[in-house]
Amino acid sequence: MNKPLNIRPFAVDQDTAPLSDIWLRASMIAHPFIGEATLREQQPLMEDVYLPMARTWVAEYSGKPAGFVCLLKDHIAALFVDPAMQGRGIGRALLDHVARGRNRMTLEVYTDNIRAIAFYERYGFEIESQREADDQGQPFANARMVWRAAKP
């Protein structure tokens, strides 16, 4: 990255619409098996429930939101990077940001999202368990992954 990346706390008024847009566009690429209609149905949940209830950080690239990460305690509830900005280290920077001061983090990822699993494994996450349905009871397998800080 040649331009500075800034990571800051989520601001409901200015960030909800752009982060929802990033989530939808990235989800359509990463989760095509869910289907666009279902993702669009889920979008209000992202805007009205998930973003506000989590501790969310926004990665800004050249002053514009380029990605975000949501935490519920030590669980990464969401990590999405604008598809046009992927491959620039933004996802890693967001993980570095939330990993500071933590000994352990968990997340769940669809097992069909091979790119995401590979990304998390490169970061040091390991698959801890799997289940055959998602949180909505749909038949989309999930893997629970765990990251542990390296011991000095």
Image: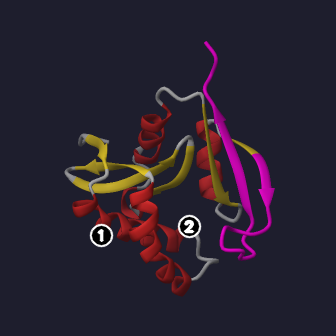
Q: Position of residue 152 (x, y in %)?
A: 61, 12
Mark 2 sits on what residue? 30
- Is residue 104 a member of the stretch shown in magenta? no
Amino acid type for the residue under numbered disc 1: Ala
Mark 1 sits on what residue? 17
Q: Quadrant of residue 23?
A: bottom left
Q: Residue furthest left?
A: 63
- Is residue 136 a member of the stretch shown in magenta? yes
Q: Position of residue 138 (x, y in %)?
A: 71, 76
Residue under the point 28% across and 42% down: 5
Amino acid type for the residue under numbered disc 2: Ala
Is residue 81 in view from this perspective?
A: no
Residue under the point 64% across and 49% down: 118
Is residue 3 in view from this perspective?
A: yes
Q: Nearer the viewer, residue 14 or 85?
A: 14
Q: Quadrant of the N terminus?
A: top left
Q: Which residues are magenta?
A: 128-152
